[in-house]
Amino acid sequence: IKELYFKYKEVINYLFFGVLTTVVNLIVKYILLFTILDAVNAFELQLAVIISWIAACLFAYFTNRLWVFESKSKEILKEILKFFTARLSTLGLEMLIMFIFVTALGLNSDIWVIVWTIVTQILVIVGNYILSKLIVFKKKEDK
């Protein structure tokens, strides 16, 4: 098992911390939507998505930098800007999906909010891995 872990360490760590990032996102979003914000209100739904995204993105950057991609870059500001820019693209995807299905199609009961949130999180996790691997934490090849 140890050998398998080291062979697929990056993917395993990404999935592990991706799940934790998703948990952070969901907890913040559901606390907001089921207490002070209302998913039926389009503005409040998007506000919950944005706030939960910020919390999850901060958590994800540090875990990805330290334990997933083990970045040694000294250009932390450049790296974090690329990370947040990449994550903004998947935030846009999440907001678009939530708007279409929850707001425009009126699937805004608690269960539908949960369903569409889960669907978007799966797409976001895959997209974030690809963007992080290919753009943000891309390792410089030896010359």
Image (cartoon, grey):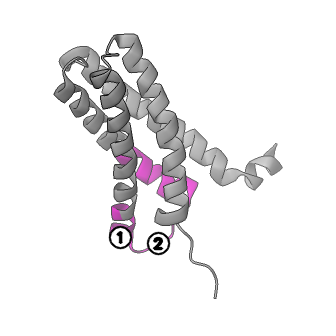
Position of 50 with respect to 27 (left or right) is left
The quadrant the N terminus occupies is top right
Residue 14 placement (x, y as % from top left): 58, 47
Residue 16 located within the stretch drawn in magenta: no
Q: Residue 43, located in which quarter of the rendered image?
A: top left
Q: Which residue is mark 1?
A: 78
Element class at badge 1: helix
What range is drawn magenta here? 57-81
Q: With 8 as the anchor, is 47 left or right in this view?
A: left
Residue at 25% over, 23% down: 32
Q: Residue furthest bottom?
A: 143
Tag 1 near tag 2, CB within 8 Å = yes
Q: CA distance from mark 1 to mark 2?
A: 9 Å
* Other residues around mark 1 within 10 Å, as few (<14) / some (14–19) / many (≥20): few
Disc 2 is placed on an element classified as loop
User: Residue 75 colored magenta?
Assistant: yes
Q: Front-most of 97 and 117? A: 97
The residue where tag 2 is placed is 73
Q: Amino acid at mark 1?
A: Lys
Residue 11 placed where, x, y %?
65, 49
Please provide percent x and percent y for residue 109: 33, 11
Whether 91 is drawn above or below 67: the answer is: above
Say above or below: 109 vs 29.
above
Residue type pointed to by label 2 = Ser
Where residue 35 sits: x, y (%)? 23, 15
Question: What label sits on residue 92 in the rendered view?
Answer: none
